[in-house]
Structure formats: C-alpha cells, structure tokens
Image: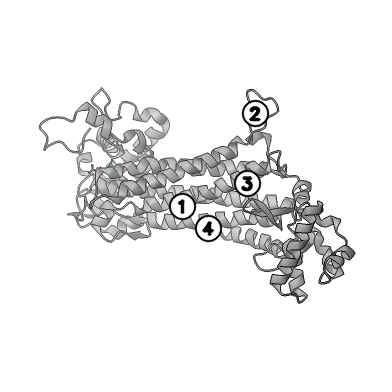
C-alpha cells in the first residue's frame, strides 16, 4: 500500500521500491507506531474528525494488530516488505500499520492520517522507542555498577600497581581501580538520562513542516503519551535528529568506557600479567591450540565499540548538509540508531557477566607493585613532609632508583640504615614506605586511594547506586 499516489500517473519502479523501502528495519518501531497512532486517534476525536465510536473502533483495531503481531512474530511482516511481488508492498512501518488498520476497521481507517505527516510520525515513533531504550540501557548500567562494587568488596585490601603510559606508576587499591569504572558508568547513566530528556518531547501537531491544519491540543497528546513537553517549532520538529545523536553519543561514550575496561582485563587476565581469571562461561578455546582460554567476550566488546562510534559518525555526517526541513536522507537515521542500541545493550549484558565471573589473584599484582619503584613518589613526598624541598627530594629518590636499577635492587633490598647511608635526609621511619602497601596510607584524601577514603567511597557508591532510579 501507498499513502500517496494521486499525483502519479505511473507506479513506482521495482528498483526504487526496493531501494527506498525501510520496512525491513523500521519494523522495530511497530509498537511505538501503534501507541502513537492510538493517541492520535484520541486527538482526532477531540477535534471532531472522529466520533467516539470511530475512535473506539480504531483504538480496538490497533490493539488487535498489536496482539496479532505479538503472536505472529516475524511472520507478521511476511509479504509486506517493499518490493514484494504480491503487490502488498508497504513503504515503511507507518504504511503497514495503516494498511492493517484498514483491513480491520474498514473505511474509517482513511481518517487516521488527517492532519498528520509521516515526518512528525517517524519522529514521534523514534522518540517513543528511544525512551524505552534509554531505560533499558540505564538499568544495565546500574547492573554493571553493582557488579563492579561486588567485585571490589571481594578484595577490599588488594593492591595493584596503577599505570600511566603503561608503566607502573603508583600503588592503588583494587577497589579504587574498580571505582574508577563505577564513576564512568555513573556518568554514562546520567548521559542516557539526558538522552531520555531530549527524546521526551512530543512532535505531533507539527504537520509535514508548517504545523498541522487542525487545532490539536498538543499538550493533551503529550500527556496521553507521557511526554514532558512539546516541540516548539514545526520546522525544527520535522528536520531535527539531535535527540538521536544524543543517544548515539551517550552510547559511544559508554562503549569507550566498556572498551577500556575490556582492554585492561584482556591484559590483566593474560599470562604476562596473570592477575585475573575470567570465568569459563565468558571465554573460548582455540580450534587448534588446546591450551588456549581466550577473552573473546571482552574482545568483542572492544570491537563493537568501534562499530557504535561508526553509528554516531554515520548519522552526524548524514545530517550535516541537509537543508531545512525533512529530507529522505533522514530515514538513514534508524539503522545506526537500532544497531547502536543493540550493541550497547548487548555489550553491557556481556560486561555484567564478565565482571560477575572475574576472580582476582591478589598475589600477582601485589608482587608487580613490590617488584617495581611504585613507592618512589611516596618516598619523595615523605622527604618533602620532613622538610626537604620537593624538587630536591625528587632528585634524591631519582638517584636512589638509578642506583637500584644499576645494582639490580628492589625496594625491599634496602634497609633503613642503608637508606640513611645513601642520604641522611632519609629517616628510619621512611623505610616503612619501601613496602608498596604503606604509601597509600598517606593518600587519605577525598578521591584518593587511602584505605579509609576507598572504604568510604565504596559505601557512598552503594548509596549513590541505590539513588539512581529515574
Ligand atoms: N520512512 C520515512 C523515514 O523514516 C518516514 C517519513 C517519510 N516521509 C516522507 N516525506 N517521505 O524517514
């Protein structure tokens, strides 16, 4: 079926129908399209286009279509795709839904599109759909944060070397490291909240671009569909996809965070680090090498992050040159949007399972910290606290490290007496700092890795997570 045609003497060519049809992907908007059309039927009743009986018949028919679709599954769309040979081809989901309505409700279905354009309808449907996706993603982010906190609680005192430039830098607590990802996911949760708010604006009443010719109470439609606000300019409503870009940006940043966690743990669970063991359920073997236990789940998360960023880029580039207002190019918003939503929810689900399966082998990262000079900063700061100007303290400890590297010594090879012999500025109590577990006790600053600061941050993170509801 077509929602247009009067102006055309000839039908569309097969190649154009195949090329332009979007039903094979925008079918994902079926529920949203039905919900929006039911609300629109109520709006049409309020402006006197539909009688109460007609509205009731239409709303009921839509309910039946929803039930039919749920029962039929993918077969619901059989024969309806653009270019289908049986002549029933529907250009898009909006066309399909109206055809189905006509099959069930008869002639009155011809009134459903009064004063409505697909330009605003597709915006409405996408917004309705995106709101649900934002909710789902936010729930999954909370699950991931919760799993991180559980993993932190399992090893409250575990020490790892923190890295900069992939070089051992300073010792930190394992929970402190995990809380860093908690913070990233907490911001992602906020970003998806912003994306939700941007999507949560109701466009119906905008018409194709100039505003509808019927006096719809737009606020009433917004209330009906639980929107917080209505769009303020019909041309903007017709030509805007910012709300989709906001979702894609939030998805891209979340995927960057997931990808970095994946990268860390691919390394940390490998033989060279040997810090972690990932569960059998989230790893796979090699068809050739019997010994392999590969972190494919994490590699796929890392891989899919590139794909999601591609989706953001694709839509940005699609939008950037479009003249006002709606252009058919904008139909290209859906596949990246759908794909990004699928990949980000899938990746979050996968990440939750990986985090839940992860086991730390605390001896390995502790040894990595002890067998390095991650304590150098602690020593220099202790000297500075005792009165040595920091620049000189830095030089002094630098010389100590150089001497140690030359003579193949580690921090634990030094005694208090030897330190004092090396430089009189070293007092005996400073020798305690040769143990990587000690230095962090001086970092009891808000946001730092001091054991008490971390214990408090963990507690606060739990409380914050419990507050992350809407
Ligand atoms: N399938 C179209 C889309 O996704 C719906 C809007 C079509 N509007 C039009 N004027 N051709 O953008």
State the mark number for residue 250. Answer: 1
Relative to 129, residue 380 above or below? below
Q: Earlier in the sequence, mark 1 or mark 3?
A: 1
Question: Does label 1 point to a residue whose CB lies under 8 Å from ligand 1?
Answer: no
426 on left or right of 89 = right
Q: Residue 231's spot in the image, x, y percent?
A: 30, 59
For the residue pair 434 and 61, the one nearer the viewer reads as: 434
Residue wearing tag 3: 264
- Could one spot residue 456 in this view of the protein? yes
Cα distance, mark 3 to mark 2? 20 Å
Cα distance, mark 1 to mark 3? 21 Å
Task: Name the secondary structure under disc 3.
Answer: helix
Residue wearing tag 4: 187
Q: Earlier in the sequence, mark 3 or mark 2?
A: 3
Q: Earlier in the sequence, mark 4 or mark 1?
A: 4
Cα distance, mark 4 to mark 1? 9 Å
Task: Name the secondary structure under disc 4.
Answer: helix
For the residue pair 63 and 307, the one nearer the viewer reads as: 307
Question: Does label 2 point to a residue whose CB lies under 8 Å from ligand 1?
Answer: no
Residue 415 falls in which quadrant of the image?
A: bottom right
Callout in the foreground (4, 2): 2
- Could one spot residue 90 in this view of the protein? no
459 on left or right of 129 = right
For the residue pair 23 and 420, the one nearer the viewer reads as: 420
């Amino acid at each position: 079926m077509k929602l247009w045609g009067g102006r055309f003497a000839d039908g569309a060519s097969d190649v154009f129908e195949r090329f332009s049809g979007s039903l094979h992907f925008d079918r994902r908007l079926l529920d949203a399209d039905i919900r929006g059309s039911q609300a629109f039927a109520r709006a049409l009743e309020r402006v006197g286009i539909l009688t109460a009986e007609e509205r009731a018949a239409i709303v009921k028919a839509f309910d039946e279509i929803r039930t039919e679709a749920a029962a039929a599954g993918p077969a619901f769309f059989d024969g309806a795709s653009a270019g289908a040979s049986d002549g029933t081809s529907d250009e898009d989901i909006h066309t399909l839904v109206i055809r189905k309505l006509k099959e069930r409700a008869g002639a009155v279905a011809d009134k459903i599109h009064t004063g409505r354009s697909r330009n605003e309808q597709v915006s409405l449907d996408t917004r309705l759909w995106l709101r649900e996706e934002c909710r789902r993603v936010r729930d999954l982010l909370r699950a991931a944060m919760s799993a991180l906190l559980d993993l932190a609680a399992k090893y409250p005192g575990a020490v790892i070397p923190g890295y900069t430039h992939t070089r051992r830098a300073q010792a930190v607590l394992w929970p402190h490291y995990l809380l860093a990802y908690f913070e990233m996911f907490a911001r992602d949760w906020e970003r998806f909240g912003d994306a939700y708010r941007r999507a949560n604006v109701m466009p119906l009443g905008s018409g194709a671009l100039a505003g509808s010719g019927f006096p719809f109470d737009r606020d009433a439609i917004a209330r009906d569909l639980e929107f917080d606000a209505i769009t303020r300019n019909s041309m903007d409503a017709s030509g805007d996809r910012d709300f989709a870009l906001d979702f894609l940006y939030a998805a891209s940043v979340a995927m960057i965070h997931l990808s970095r966690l994946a990268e860390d743990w691919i390394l940390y669970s490998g033989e060279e680090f040997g810090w972690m063991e990932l569960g059998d359920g989230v790893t796979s073997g090699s068809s050739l090498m019997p010994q392999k236990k590969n972190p494919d789940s994490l590699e796929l998360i890392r891989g899919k992050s590139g794909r999601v960023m591609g989706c953001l880029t694709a839509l940005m580039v699609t939008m950037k040159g479009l003249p006002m207002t709606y252009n058919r190019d904008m139909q290209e918003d859906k596949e990246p949007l759908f794909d990004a939503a699928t990949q980000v929810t899938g990746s979050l689900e996968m990440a939750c399972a990986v985090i839940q399966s992860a086991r730390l082998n605390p001896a390995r990262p502790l040894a990595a910290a002890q067998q390095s000079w991650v304590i150098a900063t602690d020593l220099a700061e202790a000297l500075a606290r005792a009165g040595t100007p920091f620049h000189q303290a830095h030089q002094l400890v630098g010389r100590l490290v150089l001497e140690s590297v030359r003579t193949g010594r580690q921090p634990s090879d030094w005694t208090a007496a030897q330190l004092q012999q090396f430089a009189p500025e070293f007092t005996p109590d400073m020798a305690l700092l040769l143990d990587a577990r000690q230095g962090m006790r001086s970092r009891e600053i808000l946001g730092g890795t001091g054991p008490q600061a971390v214990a408090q941050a963990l507690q606060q993170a739990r409380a914050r997570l419990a507050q992350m509801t809407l």
